[in-house]
Image (cartoon, rainbow, N blue to C red):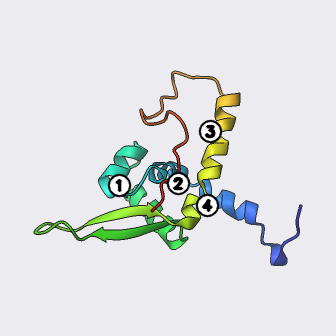
Amino acid sequence: MTQHPEGFCPVYRAIGVLQEKWVLHIVRALLDGNKGFNELARAVGGCNSATLTQRLEQLETLGVIRKSTDAEMAGKLARSIYSLTHSGQELQSVITAIDTWGRAHLGSDPKLEAPAECVEAPAVVAS
């Protein structure tokens, strides 16, 4: 393994970030395109709003996602729109690798239901 200065290990750090519950689900959902909070919550499925907010803030701080405001909502409260940054889009290969490994090594288990949109790893959508 490559030695890194002052004990920094990028693999250890990346696993620490990506293993947080819901993080890869959020990234996977945003690989399909930009989403508002509620749309993202539905796409992720099962994550309570407080946890989703916390994960989104964490991913925004890390530069994985970008939060913007939809200004086209005249007369209504503006809504937040979430999208992947270039750094977040680079996680497509991680999602694809997990998909490939899962298909090769994990049989279909009816107890582990996936959301309807979980047919295959999504293609990258340019933003």
State the residue position of label 1.
49
The secondary structure type at the circle numbered 1 is helix
Above or below 120: residue 23: below
State the residue position of label 4.
17
State the residue position of label 3.
99
Q: Quadrant of the N terminus?
A: bottom right
Discs 4/3, front: 3
Residue 116 percent location from the top left of the image: 41, 32
Q: Residue furthest front?
A: 126
Q: Mark 3, residues whose alpha carbon is within 10 Å: few (<14), some, or many (≥20)? A: some
The secondary structure type at the circle numbered 2 is helix
Q: Residue at point 56% right, 23% down?
A: 109
Mark 1 or mark 2, which is nearer the start of the sequence? Answer: 2
State the residue position of label 2.
23
Q: Quadrant of the C terminus?
A: bottom left
Q: Amino acid at mark 2?
A: Val
Q: Amino acid at mark 1?
A: Ser
